[in-house]
Image: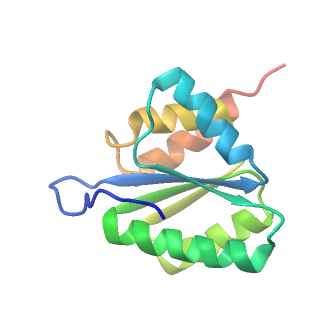
Amino acid sequence: MLEFKNLKGVGIEMKAIVVTTHGTLCKGLLETAEMMVGHLENTFSLSLDGEGITKFSESMDKLITDLKNNYDEILILCDLKGGSPYNESMKHFLLNQDVVKVVAGVNLPMFVEVYIQLQSVSLDELHKLAIETGQQSISN
């Protein structure tokens, strides 16, 4: 069971990050980021594993409901546009466009930059920063 610090209504818009991927990619990404920036707060992962899409969808619904009760805004970072984690995330975006944003194509530089800026910029700016950093971190 996840434990939350209720950060709603503390005077600033408190944001959470959800990283959701196929398999354990999201957990590995967060473990690696933690080696770089230290203990991660306000950050959650959700894996689509062998239990299937129905169980994943239920877990996503519960996580987003819990986060909406404890945070003002949520940024969801997914591995693959069009994949099941992305499609489930977009369902929550479409239902909560004012407080949920989704970015596909998560990578380590994107996550680290977004995490560092998490409480410093608006959700819209964070969304834009995630896309820009993700694109800029790819090179030959």
**Count of picture labels:** 0
Displayed quadrant of residue 11: bottom left
Q: Is residue 83 above or below residue 24?
A: below
Query: Which residue: 51% across, 80% down?
Result: 95
Where residue 17 sits: x, y (%)? 49, 51
Query: Which residue: 74% across, 48% down?
Result: 24
The answer to whether residue 87 is left or right of residue 16 is right
Q: Quick one: quadrant of the C terminus?
A: top right
Where residue 33 sits: x, y (%)? 57, 30
Where residue 64 sits: x, y (%)? 49, 70
The answer to whether residue 70 is left or right of residue 18 is left
Query: Which residue: 68% across, 27% down?
Result: 137
Can residue 100 be seen in this snapshot? yes
The answer to whether residue 42 is left or right of residue 90 is left
The answer to whether residue 140 is left or right of residue 24 is right
Q: Is residue 85 above or below residue 116?
A: below
Where residue 134 sits: x, y (%)? 65, 36
Query: Which residue: 60% across, 71% down?
Result: 60
Q: Is residue 69 above or below residue 95?
A: above
